[in-house]
Amino acid sequence: MALTLNVNGDRRGFTADPVTPLVDVLREQFHLTGVKPVCREGFCGACMVLVDDRPTLSCLMPAALAQDCEVRTVEGLAANGTLNPIQQALEACDAVQCGMCFPGMVVTLTHLMKATPGATRDDVRSALTGNICRCTGYESIVEAAVRALAAT
Amino acid sequence: MTTNPLLQSGPPGSFYIAPSLPAALDALSDYGAAGATFAGGTWIMRSPIRHEQLKPHYVAIGKIPELSAIRIGTEAIEIGAAVTHAALAAALAGLPEFGVLTAAAGRAANPAIRAMATIGGNLSASAFAAADCVPALLCLDAEVEIASRSDRERISLEQFLKMRSSLAPGRLLTRIVVPRSARRTAHARLPLRQSGDYPVAIVSLAVDVDPANRVQAVRIAVGSIEPVARRWVRLEAALLGHVLDPAQATEVAAELVDEFTGRDSVEVPAWYRVSVLPSLVRRAAIAALGS
Ligand SMILES: Cc1cc2nc3c(=O)[nH]c(=O)nc-3n(C[C@H](O)[C@H](O)[C@H](O)COP(=O)(O)OP(=O)(O)OC[C@H]3O[C@@H](n4cnc5c(N)ncnc54)[C@H](O)[C@@H]3O)c2cc1C
Ligand code: FES
Ligand code: FES
């Protein structure tokens, strides 16, 4: 089936089965490898992208449903090459370890900062319920988010 | 990493985003057994992991206004089948009599899943034993409406659970209807982690008590223990007419718990699921009395 997607402001057509998970299209057609297919089950959050500004698990979204939507991946979150506030805070707090979970973390937290600027530490934890990190123990990530929120 | 075979050429599937209920019913009827309803997709998209074939044709119902609406009436609430967990939890937040359903919809899974997964999909995924909304709606005496191109019928949720795996092609769950009453309700679930996991066991409770907390009417439903959630009728009978005391309810539950045969799974052994039930009854009773 011929499909067209808008990703990070780039509009491109391709052919695929309509139920192809969006994550595969992003990686293999758009070559955006920040998005990670780790569990393919909706449990880990490594494949999180923004679809029409909503955090969405791209392993569970069929490409056909993403048509006519605005898809944004981690590669599209640093406007004009400048890291956004949450990216800067994660770097400043040295929160990243292996990095596997980070594209998803950044997407979830970027949305939280925009949607809930007054978010508390508990709100940060709740928002990250679907983002699993095997390395950090989460504290440094939550701390970075709290700092970024406090600075806005 | 290997290329997803769906990106390569092969027999093309189709994906129809239905603009209206009649259009969806027509498409489902035309596709017959080769087609299926696509709601939030959080169960369907994991078919390859369960080694199940995807259907050649899907009819997406998420854009149908009638199926995405929640109507809060004086006698009952009506929930469109394509309402997401997140939307349902938000809409019912101010109605304590539906606390059990708000908790089921608002605490299941994780935020991104709750924004995708629908209540209709939760009730229709017949191989999914850990569905939170099923016991919650069982204890609220919910009914469901099923439609096809030619007819509509309203049946109890209990009946639907018996026939859902053999729902004829072309038939769609359209609405869930839940009667209103001044009951107290609670949803006690035990995930392995604090949140984000499937519940090991679920106890949903709806109870009417008099001013002395004596039980006038009670519905208790148990989920995730057996393949399909069901009412715990013997426990209901044992509590009826007595003062609802969480400690006593726990003891009675422990005496009656043998009637359940737990599901074995990689996460937990069967006995464990059953063994936590009395504690969940206690938690539900405490929460209902406090509600
Ligand atoms: C990471 C993760 C965690 C989860 N945790 C929980 C949890 O804690 N508690 C819980 O309850 N659930 C949990 N779930 C399961 C989730 O709730 C179900 O996958 C979801 O409810 C199914 O709804 P859906 O709209 O996505 O259904 P779909 O995947 O679209 O459909 C599921 C099935 O139902 C059929 N169907 C859908 N809608 C209708 C309809 N209106 N009429 C007839 N048939 C229909 C479809 O054809 C398909 O067979 C979790 C899922 C994931 C991925
Ligand atoms: S790959 Fe999508 S949630 Fe894990
Ligand atoms: S930094 Fe390694 S998984 Fe999170």
Image (spheres, coloured by chain):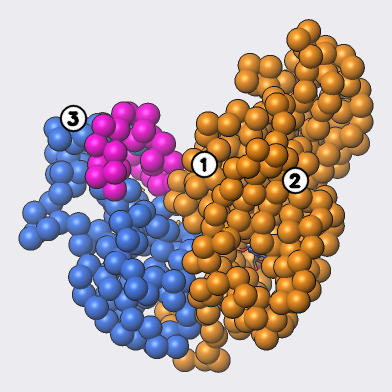
Residue assigned mark 3: A150
Q: Is residue B19 magenta?
A: no
| Residues drawn in magenta | A111-136
The answer to whether the residues at label 1 and label 2 have Cβ atoms under 8 Å apart is: no
The orange-tinted chain is B
Q: Which mark is residue B142?
A: 2
Would you identify the image quadrant in which residue B1 lies? bottom left
Of residues A125 and B148, the one nearer the viewer is B148
- Who comes first in sequence, dot 1 or dot 2? 1
Q: Does the rendering let one see residue B262?
A: no
Give amino acid for label 1: Ala
Ligand 2 - quadrant of the structure image: bottom left
Crowd class of label 1 (few under 14; some 14 to 19; many from 20; radius 10 Å): some
Disc 2 residue lies near ligand 1 with CB under 8 A: no
Under mark 2, the amino acid is Ala
The number of callouts visible is 3
Farthest top residue in view:
B212
Query: Going by the image, does B38 lie left or right of B154?
Result: left
**Secondary structure under badge 3?**
helix
SS of the residue under disc 1: helix
Residue that appears at 15% across and 56% down: A78
Q: Are marks 3 and 2 on the same chain?
A: no
Q: What amino acid is at disc 3?
A: Ala
Which residue is at the front of the view, B243 or B53? B243
Residue B10 percent location from the top left of the image: 52, 91
The colour chain A appears in is blue
